[in-house]
Amino acid sequence: MSFLYPLRPITRRHFLKITGSTAAALALHPGSLWPAEKEAIFRTVPSSQTTLPVIGMGSWRTFDVDIRSPAVRQRVEVLRTFLSQGGALIDSSPMYGLSEEAIGYALKQLKGTGSLFSATKVWTRGQQRGIRQMDNSRELWGVDKFDLMQIHNMVGWEVHLETLRAWKMEGRIGHIGITTSHGRRHAKIERALKTSQFDFVQFTYNIADREVERRLLPLAADLGLGVIINRPFRTGRLFSRVRGKALPEWAAEFDCRNWAQFFLKFIVSHPAVTCAIPATRQVPHMLENMGAGVGRLPDEQMRQRMVATFDKL
């Protein structure tokens, strides 16, 4: 198992600036970023038979902007691009600063949410505080109910689970989930999944951080859980590993045109994964990300080739 920690992290924005890809992406029509004839890839949530596109949208850091600032207009365009390209699952949290308010503002500006699958989290201790926080999130988003409410980083999870079970029975939420983004909590979340019933679990998985392949991904598959993957680019640091490196020619065999799609297709090709949620501030990046959700996916032999290639970089 290889865990890589670049000494000089580089953001995808900087990486694309270096390679000149930003200008190229801006010049292209959205449909030209991947073959138009390729079909979108969907996965089914076992507990409800809901189908979701394999590429969703995260909002950590990227949507933490004041709705009165000029920066919010860019977020509206990012969200517009996501939905227009067939996106559905948008993930946020009260922990993400102003992100929920910015998402709600953007959804209101678009005047139509299409196939939106709204997913946020409760991130506080105490039942009543949790209820107030979740009600506030619903008001910020401007939705009638959330399709998925998750317990963020397992904070007060047993108390909140009681509320969420009741709310699901009443139709106030669609699905219940639990999340972690820290490897040190893997044992704890494994115990929670084995002892309590959830519809979704969310954790970190990418081509550099593959620990969840050992236990959590197989467990989620056995339990019939939807699996959401956070930090698919390791908060942008994976692009440091490929700085100055050409995409392998054989990546075309699974309809991959850039490193972002290389990283995302590795993740969503795992049969236990339902959806990956890359976050971005940039429309060109969103277009690249959405291109990972169409066409062919690597098989297991190709996945091993991808890992071997990445580990040698």
Image: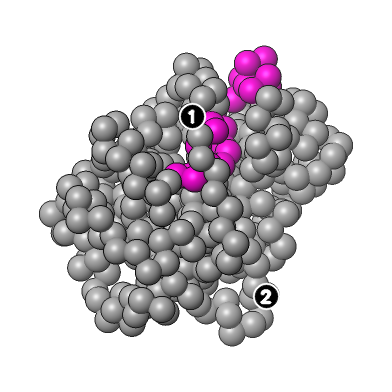
Work out whether residue 104 or residue 267 is closer to the camera in this orientation and state it.
Answer: 267
Position of residue 144 in the picture relative to residue 121 (left or right):
left
Q: Secondary structure at mark 1?
A: helix
Work out whether residue 180 or residue 134 is closer to the camera in this orientation and state it.
Answer: 180
Extreme residue in the front direction: 312
Q: Which residue was labeled with disc 1?
A: 213
Residue drawn where x is 69% and y is 65% of the image: 98
Q: Secondary structure at mark 2?
A: loop
Q: Is residue 224 magenta?
A: no
User: Tag 2: residue type?
Assistant: Asp
User: Tag 1: residue type?
Assistant: Glu
**Image: 147 above or below 166:** below
Position of residue 26 in the picture relative to residue 279 (left or right):
left
Residue drawn where x is 41% and y is 54% of the image: 313
Residue drawn where x is 59% and y is 84% of the image: 70
Q: Which residue was labeled with disc 2?
A: 66
Q: CA distance from mark 1 to mark 2?
A: 38 Å
In the rendered structure, which segment of residues is drawn in magenta? 190-212
Q: Is residue 151 visible?
A: no
Q: Residues within 10 Å of mark 2 (few under 14, many from 20)?
A: some
